[in-house]
Amino acid sequence: MWGPGIGLPPRLALSLLAGPARSCVLGSGAATRKDGQARNRRDFSDFYLQPLFDPDFDESPYYAPKGRPEPTRHVACKKLARNLVRNILGFQKPSRQLVLECNPGPGILTEALLKAGTRVIAFESEASHIPHLKDLRNSIGRELQVVHSDFFKMDPRQQEIIKPDMSRVVFQNLGIKALPWSAGVPVKIFGILPNKDERRILWKILFDLYSCESIYRYGRVELNLFVTEKHFQRLIATPKRPDLYHVLSVLWQVACDIKFIQMEPWSSFSVYPENGHLEKSKLPDSLDPMKQNLYFIQMTPRRSLFTENLSPLNYDTFFHMVKHCFGKRSAPIIQHLRSLSTVEPIEILRQVRIRPGWTILKLYPQDFKRLFETIESSEESLFKWVYDNSLEDIMI
């Protein structure tokens, strides 16, 4: 069975499968040494019992969401759908690609993907759309599979009781096979991030990516997402835009090649409000937050993300370092390092060619990675990092 160690350097691959390791930061604050000694890393064992599912799993209420927290947007323009198909598929043969579509709604993009010859798996959270999507499967071809589920709510990280990953069970049922991290893209995901949960989803995916959990157990899964302008600008921000440069900017740019494809006006989308009536283009005043242009981006995880010194075992420390630095932007980097690490900072900064007096607004995303990896590779001290419990209250 595939594990997150495949495709990594041999030492990391073995350590990932060996058992106890550093615990992960699950969405808030930094890990502490005490926590690391008290808890083992979760979800790397295959020895739990998995529940049995109906063969017709797309009807199983186990996958179905309990309710829609907000209106959902769908592609409503056929011209946009055709353009998206070209951008998602690129220059590869459609028949060799698998696209997982999140909340396709009326299925306009779904139909365009199927006509292009692509295999599509539709995760639809609204039960009323399921019959139409199944009609598409019957009329166009059997390359469409429909799952009644909200993809963005799969594999929640805040679990007091360890449960099987939903993505693992669903993907196995769908026959999706994992690829090593060093190989190509096993699955392409298309989705429109919901307004209210946009930031939370971006953080959740980040944790999954760096820990090689959930969908990233299957390799370098590519994201094709529509996001709001606010989060688009933040994702691509550099020190040249200090007002937008953020922890999210650093972590996403280190992890992925982010490609901007196009901006699309809100009139190109239909909205399915909570009252159950589909509205096209003209939205009621209560849905004003939906009246904004969306930015289509493609985020492909980098083959070079994981190294001997940055891996799914210590990514939580990397997150902690970046969060610490952004907690006080005006402080010089040498001050941050003296708070974070037991390693002599002057020598570390000399190796990465960063001046001690620089603030984080002089550091680009890859500078943070080089800095972290240099500290991790240092032989000066066995324990390289100092954890400050007070940082757990810093807002991401």
Image (spheres, grey):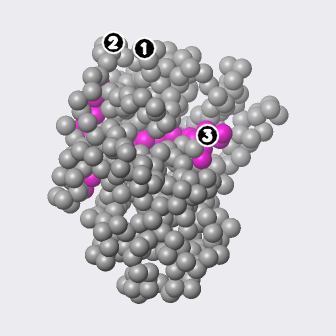
**Which numbered marker is on residue 231?**
none
> Which amino acid, mark 3?
Asp
In the displayed orientation, state which residue is furthest to the right: 285
> Is residue 351 visible in the rendered structure shown here?
yes
Against 366, residue 155 (above or below) is: above
Q: Residues within 10 Å of mark 2 (few under 14, many from 20)?
A: few
Against 255, residue 137 (above or below) is: above
Q: Nearer the viewer, residue 31 or 316?
A: 31
Which residue bears the numbered disc 2? Answer: 54
Query: In the image, residue 350 lies at what x, y percent?
Result: 41, 87
By secondary structure, the bulk of the magenta-drawn segment is best described as loop
Label 3, label 2: how far apart the Cα atoms are: 31 Å
**Which numbered marker is on residue 197?**
3
Which residue bears the numbered disc 1? Answer: 59
Q: Is residue 373 left or right of residue 48?
A: right
Against 67, residue 219 (above or below) is: below
Label 2, label 1: how far apart the Cα atoms are: 8 Å
Magenta-tinted stretch: 172-199
Q: Is residue 292 left or right of residue 122?
A: right
Label 3, label 1: how far apart the Cα atoms are: 26 Å
> Which amino acid, mark 1?
Glu
> Which amino acid, mark 2?
Asp
The reply to whether dot 2 and dot 1 touch (C-beta < 8 Å) is yes
Query: In the image, residue 255 lies at what x, y percent?
Result: 42, 59
